[in-house]
Amino acid sequence: MWRNLIVFIVIVTLTNALHDFPQSSLVLSKDVKSYLNGISATEWKEFADSGIDAVDRQKRLEKSLLSSGITVQNGSLSHIQLLDSLPSQDSKRDSEIALKILRSSLFVYNAKCVPNGIENDECRTFLEIKSVPSSSELWSECQRIVKGQRDGHRPFRRLMAPHYKNGLQEMFPEDRLPEPWPVSMALYDRETRGTKSKQSSEEDTQNLSLVQWAQFVEHDLSKPVVTSMNDGWPIECCNPNQKNLLPRHHHPACAPILSKIANPKYGWRTCLNYVRSALAVGENCNFGAAQQLNQATGCLDLSQLYGFTTAAQEKMRTFSHGKLKSTTTMGTHLNDLLPMSTDANEHTFCTTSNASTCFMAGDSRVNRSPYSILAYTLFMRNHNRVAAELGSNNPSWSDEQLFQAAKSVNVDTYRHIITNEWLPVVLGTQLAAEVQSKTESPTPQEHLSEVYNEFGVAAIRFYFSMLPNVLHNNVNADADFNFVRTDILQILFALKEEIYKPRLQYTAGKLNDILQSLLHQRAMKMDASYVSDLVWHEAIGTKPTHADVLAFDIQRGRDHGLQPYFKYLEVCKNIKINNWKDFERFIPKDHVDKLKDIYESWEDVDLIVGGISERTNDGTVGPTFSCILAEQFSKTLQCQKHQHQQENPILQQSYGKINGSRFLCLNSMLTAVPQNIFRLPSERNPLIDCDDQV
């Protein structure tokens, strides 16, 4: 009806390497505005009430599913995946209300937009500026969240408009896009069947510490969580044999990752659980497209260790001498481990209740791997070290004073290392410097702590491509920094055996070995080839112990409505992409040819797939992910500067700026560390004696 009356106003501003992404304003025609504005107040309230009724009907389905035992079982593959995206009670509450608003929006879409030929983007644009009726119960529920203490439960922001089939939340079907699992299989199978050539696939200078800290930063800034049933039970979309459920057992939030290719050796498993992400309530309580919830804060604040709510933080505190809980042994703080989880009934930190070791922290992902356990441990030790020093120097200080002061110093150290050492290696020195020098932002302060969808579910996930199957024992690394071989070394651990199932005999000595080894082992090259311990493929020949990481990331990008890869590349490089050939400027030709076999069109390539396929330049990642990471950190560092102004300048001056090498020396038993802890030791990056640092 009004199909040809859409006008886009696009403003693109480019300043050196940092980009302002297109701020697209869809101007509705007078006829469309007149028609939609003509919807009566009574009808709007009916739409809101219908959304509430739809969610109530879903609750009845959920009771039926539970009575049939359709939920995530402890210790299952789905349980491992759940720990990556475990929702809090507040997230579950927020998501239910946001779902009611989304269902209400869909009623408007189907009743008013579709029958009248109103384009999906037009309908969404109108709904996004239309508030839920103030006379409705839904408005009251939404306002209680918006006006309350949200504690980080905010929507992911978007660099670009959402990309859904109906403009609001419907994912594109398999006849439009290839299924994520076959995409992952094709990329894996066409590489080297799970092993990367050492000459072509290992980074020249980056070590595994870079990868470890990337994961730690992700845990700080981004945590998409899954939708849950009304009573809190997790949703399962596959049966215990990893096959698709019968239609009557499908929850509306299910979007399982399916494959028609199976391995008979392990029971023809063709289904991986994927539950659509929990939703967030927008600040204006408007109708509109799905907004995914981020159960994290957008500031570098170590919330993954401390927790970002008061209740979570209290679980980590001893309330004595300002310290965090720990598993303490006799002697120095360098022997301390993280506190053990006592939450065995809810399985919120590990997948088995009989695990001899299961650590706790402010985030459920602490036991994701030995890499994450080590990172959390180092910052726990640093907090308690600082608290002890402050207590000795200020005997009159209360527990609260000591805790807040130690936390402030700990966070400041963390920020300093990320900003000045980690970020330049990831982005390259020039782009990192530009991000750091950006002192003003037009973004309102309340939005600085929000995280971009494209960052949280795509760009920051680059590190998975750089993880090896195993960590080798480099504990005897020579001071002449030539000890970087991995071919004949003993294996410290295999990654697939440790994902949320800590099996190592964790001691201070074992963590020291892991730290020493990751500083001396090369990271894998960032590309679209994930090692076999991270993907599921029939050619691997071993029983799977976890979900397929790449398939999961592809599906989540589609769930979150990310635009295809080429859209971001066009903005980041200020170019126009017209065909597959245009990709070859940024992606090796042989890999472009592989993508051609997977996707019907260059316009369909997923952001995560395109991003990890790009050639790298000055930094660790390619141009598109560099662009998105820079955009995020330009906001994150603004949030950091705002918080820093509120901290005690005398305290910060007393402790100064601790760099990465000194941080590791102060909180481990290493005798020497690389000057730059994110690069392999070399003549340009010599080992520093820890005696000189302490």
Image (spheres, rainbow, N blue to C red):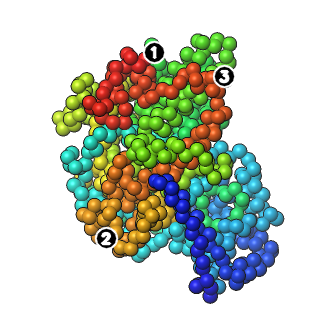
Disc 2/disc 3 C-alpha distance (Å) = 61 Å
Mark 1 or mark 3, which is nearer the start of the sequence?
1
Image spot of residue 676 (x, y percent): 37, 32
Question: Callout 1, which amino acid?
Answer: Thr
Q: Can residue 552 be seen in this view?
A: no
Tag 1: Cα neighbours inside 10 Å, few (<14), some, or many (≥20)?
Answer: few
Decide: is 199 above or below 29: above
Q: Mark 3 points at which residue?
A: 401
Query: Closer to us: mark 2 or mark 3?
Result: 2
Q: What element carries label 2?
A: helix
- Quadrant position of the N terminus in the picture: bottom right
Q: Is mark 3 on a helix, strand or loop?
A: helix
Image spot of residue 99 (x, y percent): 64, 61
Q: Residue shown at 50%/33% (left/top)?
A: 416
Decide: is 631 above or below 237: above
Q: Nearer the viewer, residue 94 or 356?
A: 94
Disc 2/disc 1 C-alpha distance (Å) = 60 Å
Query: Closer to us: mark 2 or mark 1?
Result: 2
Q: Residue 332 carries which label?
A: 1
| Count of marks, rendered view | 3
Q: Name the residue under label 2.
A: 581
Disc 3/disc 1 C-alpha distance (Å) = 23 Å
